Image (tube, rainbow, N blue to C red):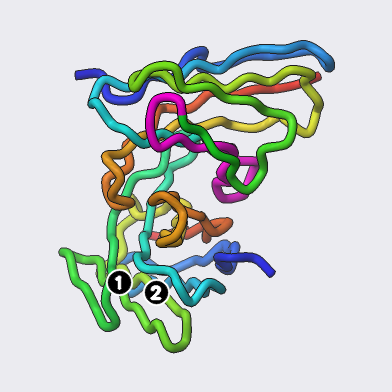
Amino acid sequence: QKEVEQNSGPLSVPEGAIASLNCTYSDRGSQSFFWYRQYSGKSPELIMFIYSNGDKEDGRFTAQLNKASQYVSLLIRDSQPSDSATYLCAVNIYSSASKIIFGSGTRLSIRP
Amino acid sequence: NAGVTQTPKFRILKIGQSMTLQCAQDMNHNYMYWYRQDPGMGLKLIYYSVGAGITDKGEVPNGYNVSRSTTEDFPLRLELAAPSQTSVYFCASSYGQPNDYTFGSGTRLTVV
């Protein structure tokens, strides 16, 4: 069983709409959860992290965590063409020296 | 302040050749990590280190070796290159908090 699962996409969203990205994880001991954005040919860039159940907002981005359901999501409001990228969900397994395990990523395309 | 520096940026190897991917950081981070990213996929952890002289296996360590003789450097060694090792390799470092990873720009390796 994969530790972190994401729908690979592509997810196509019109400009100005809300993009919703989802992720599930298998290890109930996971402590912290991350969303990275990766443009083609570039390294991943951290855009959100969340530790507690509920929502965390930062500008146009909202991360949502439900530990009971082992589910993390990322909402992008007022989507812009510059948001077109691959979004990687990642999970920190507490017992393992702060290492992060990544999902396979969801490719997001914002159409004008 | 250079951050995490990876060399080379690109390399083509023949099957059976060996090489070392270099990773250096100047942030005095104790934790360092090697990931590989296959086309259209997420990052897979190869090896990690929590300090000089201490290394441990990640998700996909077969075919690779690492050493950590100094805090700054964490080289990744491929002994007998195989086509399955064609990938982009990312090095990362952190103080130990999973939300403070710094990634290098990557090494694109092709084995033919």
Where residue A37 is drawn, which disc sits there? Answer: none
Kindly give the residue lying farthest to the bottom in the view shown. Answer: A68
Residue topped by disc 2: A73
Q: Magenta region: which residues?
A: B35-53
- Spatial separation of the CA atoms under disc 1 and disc 2: 6 Å
Q: Chain of mark 1?
A: A
Q: Position of residue B69 (x, y in %)?
A: 44, 17
Q: Chain of mark 2?
A: A
Q: Residues within 10 Å of mark 1 (few under 14, many from 20)?
A: many
Magenta includes A43?
no
Q: Residue at x 56, y 73 (%)?
A: A26
Q: Position of residue B75 (x, y in %)?
A: 51, 19
Magenta includes B41?
yes
Q: Residue at x 66, y 12 (%)?
A: B19
Instruction: Characterize the magenta stretch by its predominant secondary structure.
Output: strand
- Name the quadrant containing residue A29: bottom left
Q: Position of residue B6 (x, y in %)?
A: 44, 19
- Residue type highlighted by circle 1: Ala
- Residue type highlighted by circle 2: Ser
Kindly give the residue lying farthest to the front in the view shown. Answer: B53
Q: Residue at x 24, y 79 (%)?
A: A55
Question: Is residue A11 at least partly visible in the picture?
Answer: yes
